[in-house]
Amino acid sequence: MTAAGYLSPKEIQARSMSRILGGQDIIAIGPEGCGKTTTYILGILMRIKYGFEEAPRALVLVPTKERVLEVVDQFHALNRNTSIRIVGIHADGAMEQQINELTDGVDIVVAVPSRARAIYLKLGLNTNKIQTFVVDDAAEMVRSGMQLAINELANSIQKCQHLIFTEVMHDRLAKMIDPFMKLPTLIEVEELNEKQVETHTQLLYHVPNFRTKLNLLNLLLKDEDVFDKVVVFVNTRLTAQTLAKDLFDGKAPDIFVYKPLFFDEAGFDAVEDFKETPAARVLIVANENLASLDLSGIPFLFHFELPDQKEIYLNRIIKNQEDEDVVAITFTTDLELPTVRKIEQAIGQKIEIADLPEGLLVEEVTKATAQKKKQALEQAEEEAYQDAAFHKRKDSNTKTSNYGIGQKAIMNKKKKHG
């Protein structure tokens, strides 16, 4: 540990290591760089006393190929037992070669969930002897839609210790891990930058989905006296176009798009023109391929979507001495919370969470769910219409199997004489 540069344990290691060695299920929450990866690597290496065996004893799931390579390298850096075999599995490698590596004998597998699941279904990954099951960067896994593969792999293991490491905890993540976690211990650490950065006034609205974001923006922008000049940031030009059509049902004459996709859409090619036009109240700007903008004189900055790179956001909200007072209002869903935590870590302070205003319509049903319900209703109506014109088949005549007539006769004969 000393040779690798670890002189003293970090907070997350001091609080969780004894529980990991004791075999407890753990959910560890902490920001990037707080020592989560080192924690589970040390826990696994201390629990595996010898090597190697034909079937793995630890399975570590990470979201990307790059992360697989990083974790494998860190395992090798901290592992003193040369008989322990560590294999990394990702989607870029040849599957047959990876299966051969696993069947030759392995102790620790580090893998992306999709490839690990594919190899498991081909009977190339034996989960019968796994003692420790780790999901690293769990919130990122949920954001990337890897829940199915993770749950299938977790359910394939009879009994083991489960370790979840994540930057944030939210409802979607809890829904993914609840089926296989057994009375987990929750350990949370916060490591903010010691030096606080002076920023503009910030407010954070936490909402469940895109539609609720739209409803919230509609509700706030109704107050024209307060929000008299506003820039709204989204991630893509297509989203900017969609938002302009959805706000106030596309009937507001004071909403414009920065560099619109189509020439017939209301927009500006320069921010200065927007500032100098009294009739223009809201400008929707896409982060996509966006050069720096002069936002001076604009009192309200809305982040309808958080940019993937936190530096883009930080450049807008960090206050310079000559800056006027600006209010930065951010909308976030569960999937964007990891970015919020990275921003808070960088500025050395928590962003104030604002209460959702009265009268806000919170959309609980996703578009996909609503579409399924609509299709089910249409199908039920069609069946009801057909039942009115045709007699329904009797239950005794309903075909419940795919047996041919010859097979059915043989089986009926056996039933009578059995």
Image: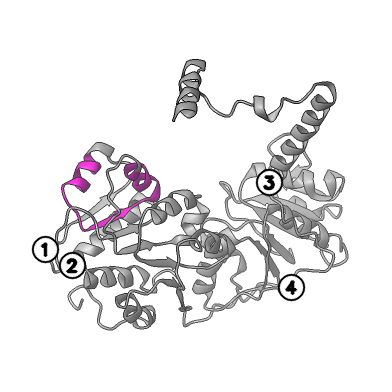
Circle 3 crowding by C-alpha within 10 Å: few under 14, some 14–19, many from 20: few
Residue picked out by circle 1: 82
- For disc 3, the marked residue is 369
Indicate which label's residue lies in the foreground, 3 or 2.
3
> Between 375 and 308, which is closer to the camera in this rendering?
375
Q: CA distance from mark 4 to mark 3?
A: 27 Å
Earlier residue among tags 4 and 2: 2
> Which of the labelled discs sits on residue 79, or is there none?
2
Disc 1 residue type? Answer: Thr
Residue 94, horizontal then vertical, whole percent: 27, 38
Residue at disc 1, secondary structure: loop
Image quarter where the C terminus lies is: top left
Q: Which mark is residue 355?
A: 4
Q: Quadrant of the N terminus?
A: bottom left
Query: Magenta span has 114?
Result: yes
Point out the stretch of residues depicted in magenta: 97-120
Residue 99 is left or right of residue 341, and the answer is left
Q: Residue at x 79, y 23 (%)?
A: 391
Secondary structure state at the residue bearing disc 2: loop
SS at circle 4: loop
Between marks 3 and 1, how big is the CA–CA gap?
51 Å
Q: Provide residue 400's location: percent of width, then percent of height.
A: 58, 29
Q: Is residue 40 left or right of residue 255?
A: left
Whether residues under marks 1 and 2 lie with C-beta atoms below 8 angstroms apart, the answer is: yes
Residue 319 visible (yes or no): yes
